[in-house]
Image (tube, helix red, strand yellow):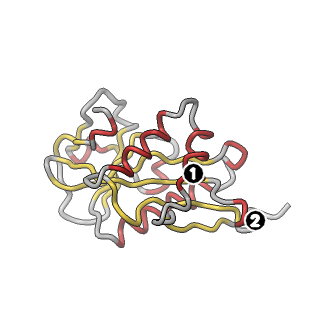
Amino acid sequence: MSPVRWTVRPEDSGGGDRAAVRRVVEAAFPTPAEADLVDALRRDPGAWLPGLSWVVADARDPDAGPVGHALITRCHVGGEPAAALAPCSVLPDHQGRGAGTAVIEAVLSAAREAGERLVLVLGHAGYYPRFGFRPASGLGISAPFEAPDEAMMALVLGEPVPSGPIAYPPAFGV
């Protein structure tokens, strides 16, 4: 069997991908809470960053629709604009095959091109460093909740890098 080739693209800004994105996020997590978070972020003009919601599809079957999704939204660090990568989702039967890597690399590249300076993620310490993430505490950045130091990570995309506490959009509930 040949390796899977992935097609990545921004989510359809006209709403054509919304149902598929919700299906992917719901399937990737044990409850619909993460899918509800995506919907709430989409409704928040202070959080939503146009062009930073990306989907991934199997290039061999693009008509099947998205199999993964990654989202970057606005947050703040020490009162300065920053970005949050969350959630990232892949359909369970496509996990471990590179779909997540492909869509995360694409959305991070889009964030860099959009002029974002800093992206934060609360995630698996064994997964996100491959994209350049490192503990946020090393940059003087702190989470507004208890989180393992190795799980609260930052990726510097530009200078200057803000420091201080993270302020997430209200949809995150913190």
Q: Taking 129 as reference, is 62 above or below it? A: below
**102 vs 172, nearest the viewer:** 172
Residue 124 appears in the picture as rendered: no
Give residue 16's position: percent from left, percent from top. Answer: 55, 62
Which numbered dot is residue 19?
1
* Quadrant of residue 103 within the rendered picture: bottom right
- Secondary structure of residue under mark 1: helix
- Residue 19 lies left or right of residue 109; in this view the side is right
| Amino acid tagged 1 | Ala
Q: Residue at the location (57% across, 51% down)?
A: 19
Please state if 68 lies on the left or on the right of 151 as rendered. right
Q: Residue furthest right?
A: 1
**Residue in the image at 54% along x and 68% along y:** 9
Lower sequence index among marks 2 and 1:
1
Instruction: Select label 2 or label 1 by which is in front.
Output: 1
Residue topped by disc 2: 61
Q: In which quadrant will I find the C terminus?
A: top left
The residue sitting at the top extreme is: 146
Q: Residues within 10 Å of mark 2 (few under 14, many from 20)?
A: few
Could one spot residue 90 in this view of the protein? Answer: yes
Q: Is residue 94 left or right of residue 88?
A: right
Q: Secondary structure under badge 2? A: loop
- Residue located at (66% from left, 47% from top): 95
Depth check: give the residue in front, 137 or 32: 32
Residue type of the residue flagged with mark 2: Asp
Q: Residues within 10 Å of mark 1 (few under 14, many from 20)?
A: few
Q: Quadrant of the N terminus?
A: bottom right
Q: Is residue 143 above or below residue 6?
A: above
